[in-house]
Image (cartoon, rainbow, N blue to C red):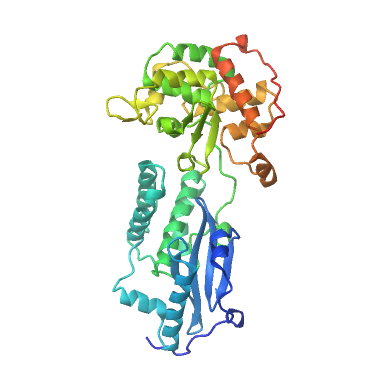
């Protein structure tokens, strides 16, 4: 493919090898970092954290072109420079490296749905469970079906808006997730050389001018009011099933369904009375340590010996409990409803029960209760301080919550508990 006007680089691009492998691996600075001669390390922040990839920018026929060299995790700095050298040689020979790469691979530009499938197959091992893969497939296939048959290099911002605008205000949560997933698929397509230029699904500097940026509506899960917890626990403990024990353990540890049903004995430290959930099983992607009260340890003693790996196994299938098992226990215990919405309580609502109790009945600082729930701290300075966690305070907090569940504080009596000043 001949060039009419050849190629050129900005003067600022003439210096080569400006980056180091250490910088590329460690930087968290969002933006495009020039290595030289049009090679950039592109650092972006999305819903799943920071991503890094190599991009070669060059000018062809007075038009800026972009060619992806792959993600940093797959292509090292040295390998990216080798790709750059090959691409620059093609330009000197009067060829378009992006066109030549596609021609060499003998590939045609795939459809959007073909790219969706390729992206999902490449990343499904990163997701915590099979449910995430199904959600990705269903969202992209159903909600973005008007894009499915289109060539991925044909998709533009107006086409993205046709998908998002009808549901942006009425189904905002669904629309936001859909936009993020479309953006990641198109980033993948760009890295594979199927398209060039800016991502038409990007929010910043693009869709933010057309779509409302109103805060995401928070959906409150129906929860049990904390003063009713002692009565509820007494009825719950009258049942003798693994699902019942799992629900009791979830309540006493203020954790999520997936964290409990996938809990393993290797995560439990009985000497330190601590449950450490690994990062790959946490919503925030960070390891979470939970102090175990005597009541929580009692539950563990009851299920010991059921299974070598899983703490709460399905004894019929020799696998973890299903994510519906604890909800079925609640449905059998009919009559417990949220005081505000009057809706039947759900399993996830017990985290709200814990948080409301900590706020109304204790004087523990809010950050201690948030840390117990493994919530991210939006105050970066405060979060840095809390990395040397006031773990002793959390031990005390969980101990008092267990006492509430045991019915030690009668008649919903509000007591103020003195938080420890000791930090571990």
The x and y percentages for residue 115 are: 35, 60
> Which of the two residues, 107 or 166, is positioned nearer the viewer here?
107
Quarter of the rendering containing residue 130? top left
Residue 330 showing in the rendered view: no
Q: Is residue 41 above or below residue 160?
A: below
Nearer to the camera, 261 or 343: 261
Q: Residue at x 63, y 32 (%)?
A: 391
Image location of residue 356, percent across then percent down: 61, 25
Farthest top residue in view:
410
Residue 132 position (above or below residue 205): above
Q: x, y percentage for residue 58?
A: 50, 79
What is the count of numbered marks? 0
The image shows residue 360 at horizontal and vertical percentages of 66, 23
| Depth order, front residue of 394/203 | 394
Quarter occupied by residue 313: top left
Regarding residue 274, the answer to whether it shows in the image is yes
Image quarter of the N terminus: bottom left
Most distant residue in the front direction:
271
Query: In the image shown, does 54 or 151 lie closer to the viewer?
Result: 54
Q: Dividing the image into 4 quarters, which one contains the C terminus?
A: top right
Q: Is residue 143 left or right of residue 409?
A: left
Determine the residue positioned at 52% across, 42% down. Answer: 284
Report the residue at 44% width, 76% height from top: 82
Direction bottom: furthest residue: 4
């Amino acid at each position: 493919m001949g060039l009419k006007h050849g190629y050129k680089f900005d003067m600022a691009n003439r210096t080569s090898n400006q980056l180091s492998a250490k910088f590329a691996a460690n930087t968290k600075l969002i933006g495009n970092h020039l290595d030289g001669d049009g090679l950039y390390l592109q650092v972006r922040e999305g819903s799943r954290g920071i991503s890094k990839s190599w991009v070669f920018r060059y000018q062809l026929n007075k038009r800026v072109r972009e060619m992806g060299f792959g993600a940093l995790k797959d292509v090292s700095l040295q390998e990216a420079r080798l790709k750059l050298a090959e691409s620059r040689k093609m330009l000197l020979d009067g060829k378009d490296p992006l066109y030549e790469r596609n021609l060499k691979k003998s590939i045609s530009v795939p459809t959007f749905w073909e790219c969706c499938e390729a992206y999902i197959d490449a990343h499904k091992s990163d997701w915590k469970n099979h449910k995430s893969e199904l959600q990705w497939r269903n969202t992209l296939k159903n909600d973005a079906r008007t894009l499915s048959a289109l060539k991925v290099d044909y998709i533009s911002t107006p086409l993205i808006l046709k998908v998002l605008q009808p549901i942006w205000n009425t189904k905002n949560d669904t629309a936001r997730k859909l936009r993020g997933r479309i953006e990641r698929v198109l980033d993948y397509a760009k890295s594979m050389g199927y398209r060039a230029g800016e991502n038409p699904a990007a929010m910043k500097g693009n869709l933010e001018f057309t779509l409302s940026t109103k805060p995401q509506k928070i959906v409150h899960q129906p929860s049990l009011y904390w003063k009713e917890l002692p009565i509820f626990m007494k009825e719950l403990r009258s049942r003798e099933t693994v699902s019942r024990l799992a629900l009791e353990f979830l309540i006493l540890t203020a954790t999520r369904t997936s964290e409990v049903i996938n809990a393993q004995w290797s995560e439990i430290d009985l000497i330190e009375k601590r449950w450490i959930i690994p990062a790959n099983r946490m919503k925030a992607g960070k390891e979470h340590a939970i102090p175990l009260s005597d009541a929580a340890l009692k539950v563990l003693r009851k299920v010991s010996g059921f299974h070598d790996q899983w703490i709460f196994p399905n004894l019929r299938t020799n696998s973890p409990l299903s994510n519906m098992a604890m909800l079925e226990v609640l449905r059998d215990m009919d009559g417990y409803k949220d005081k505000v919405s009057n809706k039947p309580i759900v399993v996830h609502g017990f985290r709200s029960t814990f948080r409301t109790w900590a706020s109304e009945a204790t004087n523990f600082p809010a950050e201690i209760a948030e840390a117990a729930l493994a919530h991210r701290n939006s105050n970066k300075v405060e979060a840095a301080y809390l990395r040397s966690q006031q773990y002793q305070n959390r031990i005390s907090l969980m101990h008092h919550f267990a006492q509430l569940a045991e019915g030690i504080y009668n008649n919903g009596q509000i007591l103020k508990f003195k938080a420890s000043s000791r930090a571990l």
